[in-house]
Amino acid sequence: MSLTSRNILLGVTGSIAAYKIAELIRLLRQQNADVQVVMTASATAFITPLTLQTLSGHAVKTQLLDADSELSMDHIHLARWADSLLIAPASANIIGKLAHGLADDLLSTLYLAATCPVYLAPAMNQAMWHHASVQANVQSLRAHGVRFIGPDCGEQACGDNGLGRMSAPELICASLFPDKLTPPATTLDLTGISVLISAGPTREPIDPVRYISNRSSGKMGYALAQAASQAGARVTLVSGPVNLSPLSNIKIIYVETAAEMFTKVLNEAPHHAIYIGAAAVADYSPAQHTAQKLKKTSTASQLLLTPTQDILAAVAALEPPPFTVGFAAETDNLEDYAKTKLQQKKLNMIAANWVGKKTGGFNSEDNALSVYWQAGQHELPMQPKAQLAHELLVLIHTIFTTPTQSLNT
């Protein structure tokens, strides 16, 4: 990646994550980017302007109305100079101000004056990140073309654990210019390894017209299949009904119901070294499927549901079983539920992500994963699912080949 001749206007706001900005500036300068820094008043409480001035090679700007500035309209000059505006860390406060068009300091004024691409790397407590008002502000900014880098999931300075931690400087640096990205530095060679992946939702019929399903798009499972194939694996994909293009050089078995997916996966699993259960399989299916369309009546009706067969547990119980990786999509208590599922189903690994009101997951182009296994755990930050699939496969391959390794990060 080369950022030669790129002008990066870096906004720093009040967050403990501001200490990471020194490293971010170093990485950008290492790639020959020209970096000018703008700090909010609260940011200077966490890291000094002198530190960032020394690293960037430019005087740090902190005031909207600066009588000592050579240019009376300095914010317009800076906005025109920038090829990219990056705000990192981006606090809940600055996200709210930008979403509502407020401009009471230099940084928020620069945002309104900038015509270049704008990137935000959020950093805040996990409860703040998930608050409805913050998420509404994030969606508003996304609608206006602002690009978000992260946040990541993991332990936070306050002691909480969850989404809200600022992405690593290396990831922010790489995300600024995706057109300049080189192939991932971590090589992945799955030559000679057979991988079975299930993806997408299932549909459980009520009558010829209606069915029970979920919001899964299948994008994560398809990204895993593509990445595994590109790494040299022999891949079989068992896919529920999705609106995605078929993948080349991959055997795809299409199914619709949970029962069909159970049968196909159990038939294929003994012939594969690794099974990744990325499908969102329905937990329940209607006890009866009527041959005719049910008619609406004025009275309440009841639908009897019966549990579907547990594909993950059945695959893990095979003799011998493949290396079995499960997925857990949760709206709360993510770590507890994921670890319980790991133990109860006797899985080798489990990848857990937030859904519902959380960021990423179903139908999103990006996702973050918390991955657990018997000897450790690892956080994969918010990123495009294609890149996330590669990183997850690297981790799976590492534990698959050295299963006793502890890799807590």
Image: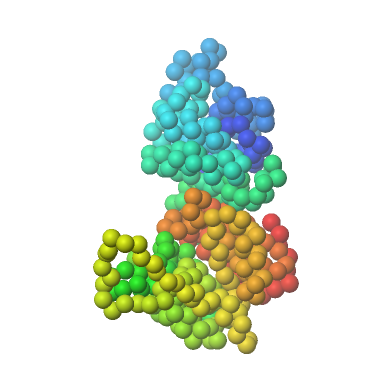
The vertical placement of 279 against 160, above or below, is below
Q: Position of residue 308 (x, y in %)?
A: 48, 76
* The image quarter in which residue 46 lies: top right
How far from the left and from the top, in percent, is residue 253? Answer: 40, 79
Dividing the picture into quadrants, the one containing residue 345 is: bottom right
Q: Is residue 132 left or right of residue 163?
A: left
Q: In this view, which residue lies farthest toward the front?
A: 299
Relative to 160, residue 348 above or below: below
Q: Residue at x 49, y 86 (%)?
A: 267
Q: Is residue 226 visible?
A: no
* Residue 330: x %, y % from top left: 55, 58
Q: How many marks?
A: 0
Residue at left offset 35%, top offset 69%: 211
On screen, residue 216 above or below 345: above
Q: Residue furthest top?
A: 67
Task: Indicate how the structure is coloured in the image.
Answer: rainbow
Left or right of 74 on screen, residue 186: right
Residue at image location 31% in from the left, 62% down from the top: 299
Q: Nearer the viewer, residue 65 or 403?
A: 403
Along the viewing direction, whichever of 125 and 68 lies nearer the viewer: 125
Q: Position of residue 232 (x, y in %)?
A: 51, 75
Query: In the picture, which quadrant includes the C terminus?
Result: bottom right
At 46% from the left and 15% from the top, the residue drawn is 72
Residue 214 falls in image quadrant: bottom left
Mark yes or no: residue 278 visible.
yes
- Front residue of 9/141: it is 141
Left or right of residue 255, residue 62 in this image: right
